[in-house]
Image: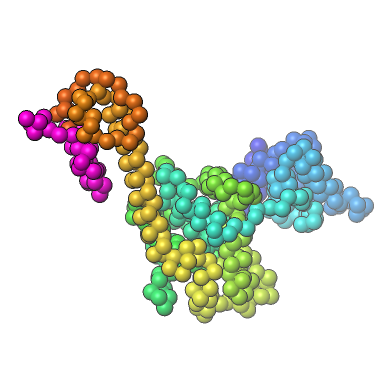
Amino acid sequence: METESKAMRVWLAQLDTQSEGTKKIYLRTLEAFLTRFKIEDGESLYRMKLDDLRSEDTRDRLRVEGMVKTYMVGKVKDGAAPMSAAQTGKAVVSFFKAQNVPFNLGRGDYPKGTGPGRRIISKEQIAEIYDKVGAEFRERNRALIMVLKDSGLRISDVVSLNVGNYTEAQVIHNADGEPFRVFDPVLTKKAKVNAFVHLGPESVKVLDTYLKERGNVRLDPLFTDRFRKRLGVTACSIQFDRLCKNIEGVSRLGAHSFRKFHFTALESAGVPQNWIKLLEGKNLGQSIGAYSHPEESGELTQTFIRSYDKLRVFGREGVQDLELRAKTQHLEAKVDTLTNEMEVFRNLAARMVYKDKVLKDIDFEAWEEVERRTVSDEALREAWEDREKRMKEEGIYLDIRARPRSSKNKQ
C-alpha cells in the first residue's frame, strides 16, 4: 500500500501508538476498501471527503460513510464475521481522525453479531481444565489459567506482561498469611486505560513454580513460546480453545470466559462494578472516573482480598490443594508408567520357556499360555532381581515367594 502521500504519512504517525497487530489490520483493511471502490490512494480518499463536506446538499456529505457501511454489510453477507467486517469502519474512522476531518460513523452503524458470544466458565470447569493440561508447557499454561482467572485481563494484556511486572509487584498478605500481588498500573492495549492488576494466592503459587522452572529475568516476557519469545495473542487464544475442548458437552468456552467469570464472581461478592472495571482495565464513565479512586486509598486492594474466596477454584485452602493435586498427579503418572512397564515385563516373561520346577515357583496371573523355549534358571532370577531392585526404588515390593530360585540352591 502506498505510504508516500501526506494523508498516509499523517495516519501512519498516529498508528505508531497502536499495537503492531492493529496497525497491520488497519492498513490491510483500508487497502481492501480503496480497491473495492477504485479509489487510487489515501490522499484521494481524503480529497473525496473534503469535497463532500463542501457540498451544498447536506445529504452528499455522508457519501464516504455510506460506502463504508455498504462495504461492511457486503463483507458479512460474504461470510465474514461481524467483528472482522467492523475493522474496516474502525480503520477508516482512524484514518480521518488523523486528518482532523469529521467522520460520522457511530456504534450503531457497525454490523452486529447474532451469536451468543463466549459462555462464562465455572469453577468446576476451570479445575477440570487445570487438571487436564498436557505435559508440554504444563507450568506455563497453568499459570496462564490462574492469571486470567484472578486478573480478568484480556489475552492481549496478559501476554504483554513482563517478568518484572510480577516480581516487582507489591506483596500483601491476608489474615491467614496468604500472599497477594498488587501490580503497578498496566496500560491496556485496547482501551488505553490503566488496569490495576491484583493476583491471589492461587496465581502466586503457580507463577512462582513456573518462573522457578524457566528463570525470571526482569525484562523477559512473563509468558513465552518454545523459542523463549513472547507468546502471541493468536497462539494464546488457540491454546485456550484447545484447553476448553477438554470439557465434554460444553461449547463456546475460551479465554474471554475467564474475564466473564472474574467480573461475575467479584460482582457477586458485592464489589462495585466500577471497581471491577478498574481491576480489569475497562473504561469508566468520565463523571465517575473523575471522583472514584479506590486504588489510591488502598480500599480496592482490601476489597479484592476480602472477596477472593469468590475467585478461588480449589476451595478455602486453595494453595495447599494445588500442592496436593500436583503431588497426586505426579504419583499417578508414576503408577501408570510402572503399570505399563510391568505389562511389558510380563509379556516378555510369558514368551520365555522355563523348566517345570521354575514354572511352579513363579505365579504370574497374566500367564495363560507359555511358549516352550530353553532358558536357564539363573538368567530368569537375574532378570527378576533387576526388576525387583528398580521397583523398590519406586516404593513397590514384589511377593518374594514368586522369586525364582538360584540354581546354586537347587542341590
**Residue farthest right in this picture:** 57
**Quadrant placement of the N terminus:** top right
The x and y percentages for residue 26 are: 66, 45
Q: What stretch is highlighted in magenta?
A: 382-411
Residue 279 visible from this viewpoint: yes
> Secondary structure of the magenta portion, mostly?
helix
Depth check: 127 or 343 in front?
A: 343
**How many numbered circles does the render carry?**
0
- Residue 331, horizontal then vertical, whole percent: 34, 50
Query: Residue at (59%, 51%) from the top-left corner?
Result: 254
Is residue 13 shown to the viewer in this render? Answer: no
Q: Judge from the rendering whether residue 332 lies leftward or rightward of residue 287; answer left or right.
A: left
**Depicted 6 relative to depicted 40: above or below:** below
Q: Which residue is drawn at 47% across and 48% down?
A: 133
Q: Which of these two is toward me, 42 or 118? A: 118
User: Which image quadrant is residue 373 in?
Assistant: top left
Relative side of 257 to 69, left or right: left
Residue 16 in percent (x, y) is at 58, 51
Compared across the picture, whether 266 is left or right of 326 comes to: right
Is residue 32 a member of the stretch shown in magenta?
no
